[in-house]
Amino acid sequence: MPHSADRSAEPHVLRLCSVFEPAGLIDGELDHGAARFDPIGGMQNHTAALTRCLDAHGLTQTVVTSRLAGPTGVSRLGRRTRIQRTGLPTARFRQLWALSALPAVLRTPPGGRVDVVHAHQGEDIATLLLARLAARRHRCPLVVSVHCSVGHTLRGRSPRARLLHTVGGAVERSTLRRAEAVIVLTARTARALADDGVAAERVSTIPSGFDPALFGGHGSDVFPEAGRPRIGYVGRLAEQKRADVLVHAFGRMAEEAALVVVGDGPERERVRQLVRASPVAERITMTGFVDHSAVPGVLASLDVLVLPSAYEEMGSVLVEAMAAGLPVVASDVGGIPEVVRDGETGLLVPPGDVDALAGALDRLVADGRLRSRLAAGARIRARAYGWPYLSGCVAEVYQRVRAPDPLLARPA
């Protein structure tokens, strides 16, 4: 049962997430070690942007997250937010961060109470177990955001993927059935959770967004040496993202263009080797990691964005690309079709299909009028994804689960 704290006051939210912005970025200095340890992707950007916006709304927050390659300890974000980093600087057993986080999660925070526990689940089931303990300890509601459903979205045949899908899927279903509220990024996941027995009235669909303040202007060309039209990939170089498929497809294009690959990750060397072996290697540029604050400038310097993922809950970079007025080419998988409307804001292709991807890119490169039409549709579509609005939707979920009378609860 939730405790009897004053419901009229802004809540103190305990946010649990295995990944968050590296400490160096918050302090104004790029932490290359942390970025290399776990290249920054959509979930890191999502949790940080949401936390900043809710801090601006006046909410008090305590974020408990893994240390990545940076130091442990407490730092500040905004006016009312504390960030507690825990764990060991190792990627091999990274879910063990939850064990070292236990003391920070179970103790009473400054201010004397926790009103809502909000867990952010990616491929990190330990976060759900930690969140259940925290909600029981503080006698408050549990909210879970599903960034990647291991039971419904995760794909792969590796032992790790199979373990996450079976064991992790069971933990996921059990936790989401117990949570007072569940936030999903797409309607597809909402339907899948309903089939799992999660009550529809407790599920809110609130996608990842973009910060409008970062997309207000156009700077100078970030890639002045690269040709036009310019195709780009922006994100983690991880197996799931299939940047290798893009490199192969670019090599098979009939039209001439340039390719820019922006990002870092465990697939970096493999992608680099594929670039070197490509018949059009002289037209491919790899830049490595860039700070998320630089992404709007990167996107403004492209003509087309590609996301060739094997699986994806949503693909937050797609929203940012649309905000920058870019047509996109993406895999027809997961929740991507809810973001990218085929023929209206971009083109969808089957995942892993090199020839289909090459054909879609040829079509966009050859047809400037099509690019312009899709870009205009993308800008219109992006209006619904601003973080200031979306964070307000999350704040409404907090208010609903804290309502003393369950009859006041309404689905968002």
Image (cartoon, rainbow, N blue to C red):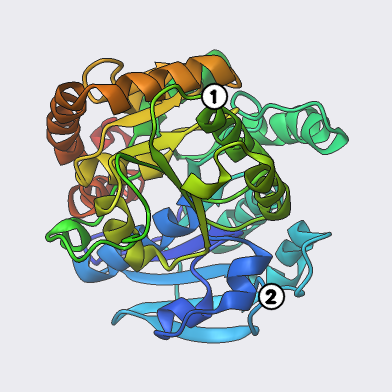
Observer-nearest of 168 and 411: 168
What's the mark number on residue 186? none
> What residue is disc 1 on?
252
Dot 2 crowding, Cα within 10 Å, few <14, some 14–19, many 20+: few
Q: Is residue 142 above or below residue 297?
A: above
Element on which disc 2 rests: helix
Q: Is residue 404 above or below residue 112?
A: above
Residue 391 appears in the picture as rendered = yes
> What residue is disc 2 on?
103
Residue under the image location 28 percent in, 82 percent down: 79
Dot 1 crowding, Cα within 10 Å, few <14, some 14–19, many 20+: some
Observer-nearest of 274 and 283: 283
Residue under the image location 12 percent in, 61 percent down: 217
Residue 388 placement (x, y as % from top left): 19, 55
Residue 352 placement (x, y as % from top left): 61, 21
Relative horizontal placement of residue 280, taking residue 374 as reference (left or right): right
Q: Is residue 237 above or below residue 349?
A: below
